[in-house]
Image (cartoon, rainbow, N blue to C red):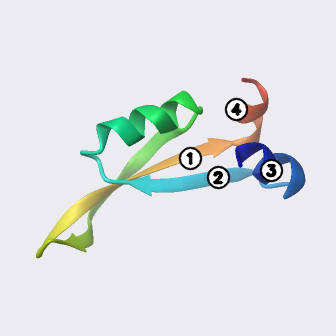
Amino acid sequence: MLRHGFNDLNLHRIYLTVLPENDRAIRLYESFGFQQEGLYRKALFKNGQFTDVMGMSLLRNEFQSR
C-alpha cells in the first residue's frame, strides 16, 4: 500500500494516527519507517473520556531510502 501511495499516486507524505497505548501498532508502523510526529492531547472521546492520539508519518524520500 505504501508503494502504491508513493509510486502510483505520487504522494509526498503518508500519515496516520494511533492511540499512544497501542504499543504493538506503534512498533509495526515504526518497522515500516513511520516516525512519531507528536501528540494530539485529548483529541478523541472514547469510553466516556477524552484521550490522547499520536500522529505518525512517512515521507517519500524516507520510504525510497529503505
Q: CA distance from mark 3 to mark 4?
A: 15 Å
Report which residue position mark 1 lands on: 57
Q: Residues within 10 Å of mark 3 (few under 14, many from 20)?
A: few
**Residue 46 in the figure: left or right of residue 20:** left
Amino acid under disc 2: Ile
Local secondary structure at mark 2? strand
Residue depicted at x 29% and y 47%? 20
Q: Position of residue 62 (x, y in %)?
A: 70, 32
Kindly report which numbered mark, 3 or 2, lies closer to the viewer in this rendering: 3
Amino acid under disc 1: Ser
Q: CA distance from mark 3 to mark 2?
A: 11 Å
Local secondary structure at mark 1? strand
Report which residue position mark 4 lands on: 62
Q: CA distance from mark 1 to mark 4?
A: 10 Å
Q: CA distance from mark 3 to mark 1?
A: 16 Å
Kindly report which numbered mark, 3 or 1, lies closer to the viewer in this rendering: 3
**Residue 10 in the figure: left or right of residue 41:** right
Residue depicted at x 31% and y 53%? 19
**Residue 10 in the figure: left or right of residue 44:** right
Give whichever of 63, 24 is nearer the camera. 24
Number of the label disc, if any, that sits on residue 47 = none
Amino acid under disc 3: His
Report which residue position mark 3 lands on: 4
Q: Position of residue 61 (x, y in %)?
A: 76, 35
Q: Residues within 10 Å of mark 4 (few under 14, many from 20)?
A: few
Q: Position of residue 7 (x, y in %)?
A: 86, 47
Amino acid under disc 4: Glu
Number of the label disc, if any, that sits on residue 14 = 2
Residue depicted at x 40% and y 39%? 26
Q: Residues within 10 Å of mark 1 (few under 14, many from 20)?
A: some
Q: CA distance from mark 2 to mark 4?
A: 11 Å
